[in-house]
Image: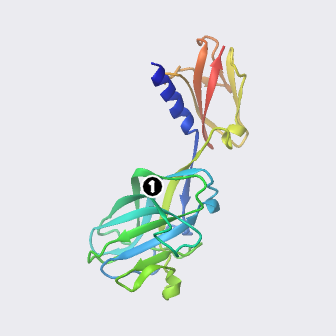
């Protein structure tokens, strides 16, 4: 019983707050028929480099899903999306100086022209806190399929491409080989994992501690509480209601409990002692 209790507490406190963020350089979600370039028949590497600080990400970042634009495709195609940590010297030294964090096979079906294909990572890719930049790579092998990744009319930074078959063996900006309008649509989305005590925890006030009769929960006016639950250390919901900013714990047994507060800004988990 003791081992179960300790495990439950560890799970609750390992991930306290999550905030979803999409990494993108595209200014809209409209795939055009012109903003792409590729090597006919395969052997295409197309990618984007994202500086995490530009998106306000400083903690662990767990990538769970992504999206790829499709300009045109001649048959069903299997692509591989890979996430690398790269340094500020990229593309110099790639891939030797990079770290592969994870990959996902993505099936893009025939008939997807001028659409966006969404996919999910079977195993979420964890980007460690402190990582400055990542490369999101979409790879097509030499399979004979005509594949042009989709692009949008506008972008905030340029993508990268490589193809040994088409004499571009190393990652190069499309503009450097005469294709400045190649605006590949390559996005990924994930959750920034924040520790208890970061941001939301500083804004939410929970008192008194220890609790005797009630637990008060106060949040700033720009934060909305969407759900509150109080669990015992075995993970059982006590079923106590949150009303008027309070939970009445007068009839609750003495001991340690786990309070979760879901808000419009994320979820906060905190240990509560009932006297």
Q: Nearer the viewer, residue 194 or 85?
A: 85
Residue found farthest to the bottom: 178
Would residue 34 be found to the left or right of residue 26 on screen?
Answer: left
SS at mark 1? strand
Q: How far across and how far down the image is residue 83, in percent?
A: 46, 61
Q: Residue at x 45, y 24 (%)?
A: 4
Kindly identify which residue carries mark 1: 65
Q: Residue at x 59, y 52 (%)?
A: 129
Would residue 162 be found to the left or right of residue 217 on screen?
Answer: left
Q: How far across and how far down the image is residue 119, in percent?
A: 39, 57
- Number of marks in picture: 1
* Image-quadrant location for residue 76: bottom left
From this view, report whether residue 11 is shown above or below residue 128.
Answer: above
Q: Residue at x 40, y 63 (%)?
A: 81
Work out which quarter of the rendered image holds the C terminus and state it: top right
Q: How far across and how far down the image is residue 110, in percent?
A: 29, 69
Would residue 10 be found to the left or right of residue 249 on screen?
Answer: left
Work out which quarter of the rendered image holds the N terminus and state it: top left
* Image-quadrant location for residue 65: bottom left
Q: How far across and how far down the image is residue 211, in percent?
A: 68, 18
Is residue 149 visible in the rendered image? The answer is no
Is residue 220 visible in the rendered image? The answer is yes
From this view, report whether residue 17 is shown above or below residue 217.
Answer: below
* Image-quadrant location for residue 246: top right
Would residue 123 be found to the left or right of residue 189 on screen?
Answer: left
């Amino acid at each position: 019983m003791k081992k179960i209790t300790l495990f439950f507490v560890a799970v609750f406190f390992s991930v306290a707050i999550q905030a979803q963020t999409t990494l993108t350089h595209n200014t809209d979600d409209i795939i055009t028929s012109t903003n792409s370039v590729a090597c006919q028949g395969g052997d295409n590497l197309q990618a984007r480099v994202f500086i995490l600080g530009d998106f306000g990400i400083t903690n662990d970042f767990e990538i769970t899903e992504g999206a790829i634009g499709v300009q045109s495709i001649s048959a069903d195609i299997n692509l591989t999306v890979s996430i690398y940590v790269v340094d500020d010297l990229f593309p110099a030294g790639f891939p030797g100086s990079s770290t592969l964090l994870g990959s996902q096979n993505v099936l893009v079906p025939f008939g997807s022209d001028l659409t966006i294909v969404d996919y999910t990572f079977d195993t979420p890719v964890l980007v460690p806190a402190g990582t400055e930049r990542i490369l999101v790579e979409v790879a097509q092998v030499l399979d004979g399929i005509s594949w042009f990744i989709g692009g949008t009319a506008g972008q905030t930074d340029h993508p990268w491409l490589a193809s040994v078959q088409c004499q571009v063996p190393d990652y190069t900006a499309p503009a450097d080989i005469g294709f400045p309008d190649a605006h590949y649509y390559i996005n990924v989305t994930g959750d920034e994992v924040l520790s208890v005590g970061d941001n939301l925890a500083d804004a939410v006030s929970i008192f008194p501690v220890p609790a005797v009769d009630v637990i008060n929960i106060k949040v700033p006016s720009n934060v909305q509480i969407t759900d509150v639950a109080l669990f015992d250390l075995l993970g059982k919901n006590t079923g106590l209601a949150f009303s008027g900013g309070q939970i009445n714990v007068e009839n609750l047994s003495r001991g340690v409990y786990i309070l979760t507060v879901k808000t419009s800004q994320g979820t906060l988990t905190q240990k509560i002692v009932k006297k």
